[in-house]
Image: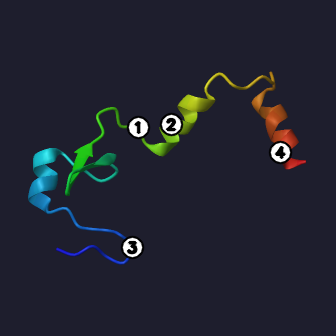
């Protein structure tokens, strides 16, 4: 198996199935001596969920949806 020019490699289907690596599963890499370990991230959140979690409770304006739309549409 070869790494592509973009740094990509295909994980064989048997390994993906055995480890529960579905599309959009977050993984992490660890270098151990001369080997690289790929590990499924336990508390996986997709990027959008992370953004929402960081922004939750940050809004200070008490505007209605109609007021916000009026501001954004000019």
Above/below status of 9 relative to 28: below
Which residue is more in the foreground, 47 or 68?
Answer: 47
Q: Residue at x 58, y 31 (%)?
A: 54
Q: Nearer the viewer, mark 4 or mark 1?
A: 1
State the CA–CA distance, disc 1 to disc 3: 24 Å
Q: Nearer the viewer, mark 2 or mark 3?
A: 3
Q: Residue at x 83, y 45 (%)?
A: 72
Q: Which residue is mark 4?
A: 72
State the CA–CA distance, disc 2 to disc 1: 6 Å
Above/below status of 63 relative to 30: above
Q: Which residue is mark 1?
A: 45
State the CA–CA distance, disc 2 to disc 4: 25 Å
Please indicate whether residue 74 sits to the left or right of residue 69 in the image.
right
Q: What kind of element bears circle 4?
A: helix
Q: Residues within 10 Å of mark 3 (few under 14, many from 20)?
A: few
Q: What kind of element bears circle 3?
A: loop
Q: Which mark is residue 50?
A: 2
Q: Which residue is mark 3?
A: 6
Q: Nearer the viewer, mark 2 or mark 4?
A: 2
């Amino acid at each position: 198996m070869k790494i592509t020019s973009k740094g990509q490699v295909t994980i064989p289907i048997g390994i993906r199935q055995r480890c529960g690596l579905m599309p959009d599963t977050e993984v992490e890499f660890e270098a151990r001596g001369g080997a690289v370990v790929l590990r499924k991230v336990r508390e996986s959140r997709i990027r959008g969920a992370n953004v929402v979690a960081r922004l939750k409770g940050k809004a200070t304006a008490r505007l209605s949806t109609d007021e916000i739309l009026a501001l954004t549409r000019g």
